[in-house]
Image: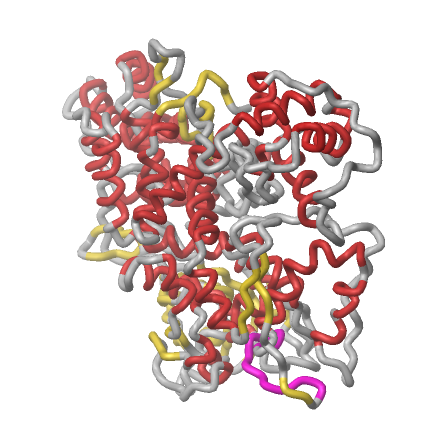
């Protein structure tokens, strides 16, 4: 059985029962276990069957502690035999139960030793670049090549470049190029109107005027904020869609708006034809994995190949070599170009055989420029560019050690989502990435760079599940204030807040859950009951002194289209912030209680507490979710529901582990947030989340001790978020790899 399936099955037994298991009587069936067992064998059986929920030493994790056990060998052995594992109790027979019981009872009752005497390194793996990593890498390659000479914008790749100081320069991230082809017409006025400028009907009202360029084309280059935007061209007062943009949405009047998504990333382009993510399929995400960089999900498809070839040809036409042949022999200049470009593209120096092969490609081409294009196209279609290599070199102890250039790529793609810069490649080549201290030094350098801010924004959006805001629907009858502009402001708020806390605030995890300030812009100010002031950091008031938990985007994302959801919000806290996962609900669980104007949400959800098949799990969920009831399904504050004051009190049970028997009552959302901020479990969960992000997968059961060690370091650092990334990337179990290869 797979570790995750086992974990969920064990958790189902631990959490989803209507009452605790009896502690003073024998199980229904007569015990058949032997009176003694083999503790050594029991240790390995326990690790395979039980540690996922009860912890590596039986002292509890997601489920209750088994150490110390005071009710005797026979009862423990027979319980294990007859009930474990929950999905197949026959898998552990009498001998198995006795052996596990013998091992558990052999542990010291006060301080059970941590069973981490052989910490398991990560497996060796190849990781396909994600869409964003790929696009950022291409943009970085392009920016590293000499620029083409120009006199005007039209001399460059107009959709993505501008002529600056007589050289073609990549447009700044966020700059969008709008193009309207006149088709022989000579209009007096052409401008852009959209959600970004209030749908201005005229230039005087704020429309963005377009200028007539060459080849019968009207052009506008304009900085557009990241997000989803709708727009049209206005030609002599007539509204027209952008025929060159296939992305459209109904305009509400029987026509279509053009839709533009601006994703301003580290080194990436935004909008326009030079979007190197176009044509690439969205990344699939394995169950329980929040991020788009899943190592196991990176499978190349025919759609990938077509997009790679198209993008490679586009970039090949733009690359300018650092030299030109001065005579009939192209080889010296070709070798200089191949070594320079290849070092960047492959993230390592090319060996002599590779150099010779690519130089031969230039020499055999019709001309030097054609040879350069052939080299670039070939390199960009190579696995050495498209994949991140984390294979390592064999060591005497049977493990594999990541090489310096593999470490450089691991650092750069984790912290910048792009290829290493020259300084990092130089450090690798000079042997300055050989020790954990070396790696930590470079990791902190990368984190100090502005590019790390965009990575943290993307990380936070995926960690918190806020990408769903892009497709979120709300009932226009119940929430007419939910507009495209409000959706976009919600999408930007929480990632900007996390970035601010990590880089400009305390940098501590607890501030993420206790701050009463956030980034407010546009319609968010009205939703929060604030004055319409320039966008920026605003004080949200004491009722929202719960950090990201009180953000409108998060509250709206974890609610239904027409009502709040204590279940969605409670599960968010348990899964995203505490890493406590629940099995799927039973088939007869039923749906969301119908909206009743005469009943509060708390009253409608009483069925979960009354139904024994629901109570076991929902005792951990609903009482947490009720703490959010002071905010409606759009995230706006509310004090009354169904004509009665809203009760925002709740109970946080077993926050550190299920079955611990602990309870913390709270009356407001800030009180709940403060309890989570001070919880070791929440910090450990964040450390585990960073571990998963840097590895590209959920940890295996054998890596539980590694994750616990990282959690200890994170807690010891005071919850320093940047240090969580540094520790995960400098851990010996990451730098050293096992002989196992992830497939």
Task: Identify the image quadrant of residue 26.
Answer: top right
Q: How many marks?
A: 0
Q: Is residue 605 depicted above or below 638 in this figure? A: above
User: What is the x, y in percent for residue 117?
Assistant: 41, 23
Question: Which residue is rendered at x = 52% and y = 68% of the image?
Answer: 553
Q: Is residue 573 above or below residue 126?
A: below
Q: Quadrant of residue 433?
A: top left
Q: Height in image: 41 above or below 348?
A: above
The colour scheme used to paint the residues is secondary structure
| Of residues 113 and 172, the one drawn nearer to the viewer in this rendering | 113
Q: Is residue 720 magenta?
A: no
Residue 156 seen in render: no
Q: Nearer the viewer, residue 238 or 347?
A: 347
Q: Residue at x 47, y 33 (%)?
A: 112
In the image, residue 72 lies at what x, y percent? 65, 32
Q: Residue furthest left?
A: 326
| 114 relative position to 1: left or right | left
Task: Give 285 or 130, whichever is nearer the viewer.
Answer: 285
Q: Position of residue 590 (x, y in %)?
A: 82, 60
Q: Nearer the viewer, residue 524 or 203?
A: 524
Residue occupying image coordinates x 63% and y 27%: 101
**For residue 286, above or below residue 599:** above
Can residue 348 be seen in the rendering of this structure?
yes
Left or right of residue 42: residue 163: left
Per the rendered image, the range of residues in magenta is: 631-642
Tell me where residue 334 sits by quadrant.
top left
User: What's the magenta bit mostly, secondary-structure-wise?
Assistant: loop
Picture quarter with the N terminus: top right
Task: Give the quarter of the figure containing the C terminus.
Answer: top right
Query: Horizontal and vertical percent for residue 77?
Result: 69, 28
């Amino acid at each position: 059985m797979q570790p995750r399936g086992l974990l969920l099955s064990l958790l189902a037994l631990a959490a989803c029962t209507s009452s605790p298991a009896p502690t003073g009587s024998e199980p229904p069936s007569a015990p058949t276990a032997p009176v003694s067992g083999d503790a050594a064998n029991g240790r390995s059986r326990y690790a395979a069957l039980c540690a996922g929920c009860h912890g590596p030493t039986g002292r509890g994790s997601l489920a209750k502690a088994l150490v110390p056990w005071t009710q005797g060998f026979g009862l423990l052995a027979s319980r294990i035999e007859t009930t474990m594992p929950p999905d197949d109790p026959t898998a552990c027979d009498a001998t198995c139960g006795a052996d596990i019981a013998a091992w558990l009872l052999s542990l010291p009752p006060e301080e059970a030793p941590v069973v981490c005497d052989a910490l398991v390194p990560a497996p060796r793996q190849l990781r396909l670049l994600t869409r964003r990593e790929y696009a950022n890498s291409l943009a970085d390659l392009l920016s590293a090549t000499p620029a083409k000479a120009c006199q005007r914008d039209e001399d460059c790749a107009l959709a993505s470049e501008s002529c600056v100081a007589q050289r073609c320069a990549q447009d700044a991230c966020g700059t969008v190029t709008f193009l309207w082809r006149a088709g022989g017409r000579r209009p007096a006025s052409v401008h852009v109107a959209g959600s970004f400028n209030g749908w201005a009907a005229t230039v005087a009202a704020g429309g963005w005027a377009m200028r007539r360029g060459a080849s019968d084309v009207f052009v506008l280059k304009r900085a557009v904020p990241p997000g989803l935007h709708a727009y049209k061209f206005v030609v002599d007062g007539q509204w027209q869609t952008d025929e060159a943009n296939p992305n459209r949405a109904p305009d509400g009047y029987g026509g279509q708006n053009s839709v533009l998504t601006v994703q301003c990333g580290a080194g990436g382009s935004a909008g326009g034809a030079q979007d190197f993510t176009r044509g690439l399929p969205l990344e699939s995400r394995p169950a329980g994995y929040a991020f788009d960089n899943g190592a196991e999900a990176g499978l190349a498809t025919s759609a990938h190949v077509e997009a790679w070839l198209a993008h490679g040809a586009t970039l090949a036409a733009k690359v300018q070599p650092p030299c030109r042949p001065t005579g009939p022999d192209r080889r010296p200049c070709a070798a200089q170009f191949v070594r320079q470009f290849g070092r960047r593209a492959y993230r390592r120096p090319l060996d002599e055989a590779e150099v010779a092969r690519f130089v031969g490609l230039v020499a055999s081409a019709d001309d030097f420029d054609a040879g350069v294009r052939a080299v670039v196209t070939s390199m960009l279609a190579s696995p050495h560019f498209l994949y991140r290599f984390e294979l390592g070199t064999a060591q005497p102890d049977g493990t594999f050690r990541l090489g310096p250039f593999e470490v450089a790529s691991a650092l750069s793609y984790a912290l910048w989502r792009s290829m290493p810069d020259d300084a990092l490649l130089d450090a690798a080549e000079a042997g300055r990435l050989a020790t954990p201290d070396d790696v930590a030094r470079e990791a902190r350098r990368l984190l100090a760079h502005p590019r790390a801010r965009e990575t943290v924004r993307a990380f936070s959006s995926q960690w918190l599940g806020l990408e769903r805001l892009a497709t979120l629907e709300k009932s226009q009858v119940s929430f007419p204030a939910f507009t495209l502009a409000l959706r976009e402001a919600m999408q930007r708020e929480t990632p900007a807040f996390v970035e601010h806390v990590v880089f400009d605030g305390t940098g501590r995890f607890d501030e993420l859950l206790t701050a009463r300030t956030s980034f407010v812009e546009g319609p968010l100010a009205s939703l929060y009951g604030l004055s319409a002031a320039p966008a920026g950091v605003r004080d949200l008031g004491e009722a929202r002194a719960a950090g990201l938990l009180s953000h409108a985007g998060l509250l709206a994302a974890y609610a239904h289209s027409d009502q709040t959801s204590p279940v969605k919000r409670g599960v968010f806290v348990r899964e995203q912030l505490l890493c406590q996962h629940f099995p799927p609900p039973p088939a007869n669980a039923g749906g969301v209680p119908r909206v009743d104007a005469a009943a509060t949400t708390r009253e409608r959800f009483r069925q979960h507490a009354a139904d024994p098949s629901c109570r076991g799990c929902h005792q951990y969920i609903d009482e947490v979710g009720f703490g959010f009831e002071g905010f409606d399904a759009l995230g706006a504050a509310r004090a009354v529901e169904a004509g009665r004051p809203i009760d925002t009190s709740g109970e946080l049970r077993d926050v550190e582990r299920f079955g611990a028997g602990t309870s913390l009552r709270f009356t407001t959302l800030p009180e709940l947030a403060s309890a989570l901020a001070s919880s070791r479990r929440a910090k450990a969960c964040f450390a585990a989340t960073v571990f998963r992000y840097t590895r590209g997968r959920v940890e295996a059961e054998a890596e539980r001790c590694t994750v616990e060690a990282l959690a200890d370091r994170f807690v010891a650092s005071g919850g320093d978020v940047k240090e969580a990334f540094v520790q995960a990337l400098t851990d010996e179990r990451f730098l050293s790899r096992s002989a196992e290869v992830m497939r």
